[in-house]
Amino acid sequence: MANPETFPLPHALAQKLRGVSDTLHNGRGFAVIRGLTVHGRSDEDNVIAHVGIGSYIGRDRATNSNGMAMGTSISPSFY
């Protein structure tokens, strides 16, 4: 299971992702993270990166605190 202890990131990036978490949970409720290219890595490595980065933003779950379904998108068309 990925978490900040098993998926270490540089301190500055970890702090930025915690800010994203605050925006998602206490602010406008969405965020766009750009700059992580999916090209040149396997699908498996991209999923690992997605899950690892996500572990800094919130707990692993398929619904929000109101029980509504949530989703994510990994799209190479934006990179």
Image (tube, rainbow, N blue to C red):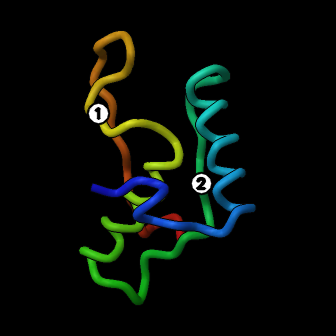
Judged left or right of residue 20, residue 69 is left
Mark 2: give few (<14), some (14-19) or many (20+) Cα within 10 Å.
Answer: few
Residue at the spot x=41%, y=60% of the render? 52
What residue is rendered at 65% in x and 31% in y?
22
The residue identified by callout 1 is 61
Residue 44 drawn at (x, y percent)? 25, 74
Name which residue type carries label 1: Arg
Please give left or right for residue 1 compared with residue 77 in the image.
left
Percent position of residue 61, x then y: 29, 33
Q: Looking at the rendering, which quadrant does residue 12 occupy?
A: bottom right
What quarter of the picture does the N terminus occupy? bottom left
- Give me the disc on residue 33: 2
Q: Residue lying furthest right in this view?
A: 12
> Could you say where residue 66 lies in the image, as x and y percent from the top left?
36, 10
Q: In the figure, residue 59 lies in which quadrant?
A: top left
Of residue 20 and residue 36, the one placed in the foreground of this image is 20
Q: Residue at x 37, y 50 (%)?
A: 73
The three-letter amino acid code for the residue at tag 2 is Ile
Mark 2 or mark 1, whichever is nearer to me: 1
Looking at the image, is 18 positioned above or below residue 14? above
Residue 21 point in image, percent of width and height: 59, 37
